[in-house]
């Protein structure tokens, strides 16, 4: 009897010890699982955040590339429009007078429209140089029609010179063509008084040259009444100040535009 009681007591004690140990083991097992799960969740969050950040950077890079492409396109369009305008101004003397104004307006409008794209996309340095180039284009437009009248007349007068020996030529038409040409070449550098005194002489030689039609003579005389920017309008045989200035401003714009694209790249 005593032995049975002792065995029962030992069994109960063992049970009391075993149960807490089992509970404790289960607790630590569950706690370890919770930690592992928490670590997995954190790792997943970090991975998701990294993926989101990478996607964001990729999106920014894509948008920056698109912005650079748009800038490049805007710069090219503006430069092309300016080049077309200056080429048109150079060719305008050979265009019939009735078609000059419309053609010039088209090309000048294209420059203004193209400049708007640079104004929207370009950084300040590029925008400043674009403004300088736009001003030079405006100056080209301002002088183009009068320049066309003068350069067309100069060309016609040169064609009317004596085809053999101009120095000894006695033909009235040939002599008048040369005298009129010489007057126009120096017209902008004459004193006002001298210029007014020679105005009748200029008209007479223009008419006697037979190089110009009556309407062309009237146009030349109208232009001759104002000598502002004369050298730029008449151009030159070795130098052309108006075109030289345009080229210099154009080069400045190209340099700054390229630099801005290099910074983006």
Image (spheres, rainbow, N blue to C red):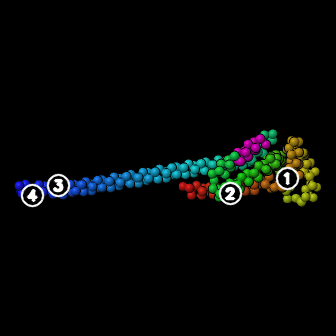
Q: Residue at x 51, y 49 (%)?
A: 59
Which residues fall within the magenta stretch?
Answer: 101-112
The location of residue 220, given as percent across then percent down, is: 86, 48
The answer to whether the residue labelled 4 contacts the one labelled 1, judged by CB atoms less than 8 Å apart, is no
Q: Residues within 10 Å of mark 2 (few under 14, many from 20)?
A: some
- Answer with left or right where residue 235 lies relative to residue 61: right
Q: Which residue lies furthest to the front in this view?
A: 1
Membership of 102 in magenta stretch: yes
Residue matched to label 4: 6
The answer to which of marks 2 and 3 sits earlier in the sequence is: 3
Q: In which quarter of the image is the N terminus?
A: bottom left
The location of residue 69, given as percent across then percent down, is: 57, 49
Q: Residues within 10 Å of mark 4 (few under 14, many from 20)?
A: few
SS assignment at label 4: helix
SS assignment at label 2: helix
SS assignment at label 1: helix
Residue matched to label 3: 15
The answer to whether the residue labelled 1 contacts the one labelled 3, judged by CB atoms less than 8 Å apart, is no
The location of residue 201, given as percent across then percent down, is: 92, 51
Residue matched to label 2: 128
Q: Quadrant of residue 126?
A: bottom right
The answer to which of marks 1 and 3 sits earlier in the sequence is: 3
Q: Residue at x 76, y 52 (%)?
A: 139
Residue matched to label 1: 184
130 up-or-down from 156: above or below? below
- Answer with left or right where residue 65 lies relative to residue 24: right
Q: Which residue is drawn at 75% across and 56% down?
A: 241
């Amino acid at each position: 009897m005593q032995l049975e009681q002792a065995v029962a007591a030992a069994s109960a004690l063992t049970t009391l010890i075993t149960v807490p140990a089992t509970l404790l083991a289960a607790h630590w097992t569950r706690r370890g699982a919770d930690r592992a799960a928490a670590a997995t969740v954190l790792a997943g969050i970090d991975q998701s955040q990294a993926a989101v950040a990478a996607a964001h950077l990729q999106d920014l890079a894509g948008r920056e590339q698109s912005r650079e492409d748009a800038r490049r396109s805007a710069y090219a369009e503006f430069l092309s429009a300016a080049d077309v305008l200056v080429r048109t101004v150079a060719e305008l003397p050979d265009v019939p007078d009735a078609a000059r104004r419309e053609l010039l307006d088209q090309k000048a409008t294209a420059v203004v429209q193209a400049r708007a794209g640079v104004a929207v996309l370009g950084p300040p340095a590029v925008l400043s140089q674009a403004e300088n180039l736009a001003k030079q284009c405006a100056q080209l437009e301002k002088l183009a029609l009068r320049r066309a009248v003068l350069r067309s007349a100069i060309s016609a007068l040169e064609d009317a010179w004596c085809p053999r020996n101009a120095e000894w030529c006695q033909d009235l038409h040939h002599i008048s063509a040369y005298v009129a040409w010489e007057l126009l070449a120096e017209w902008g550098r004459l004193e006002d008084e001298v210029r007014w005194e020679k105005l009748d002489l200029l008209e007479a030689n223009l008419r006697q040259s037979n190089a110009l039609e009556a309407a062309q003579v009237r146009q030349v005389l109208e232009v001759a009444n104002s000598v502002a920017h004369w050298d730029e309008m008449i151009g030159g045989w070795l130098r052309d100040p108006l075109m030289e200035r345009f080229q210099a401003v154009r080069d400045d714009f190209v340099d700054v535009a390229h630099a801005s694209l290099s910074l983006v790249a």
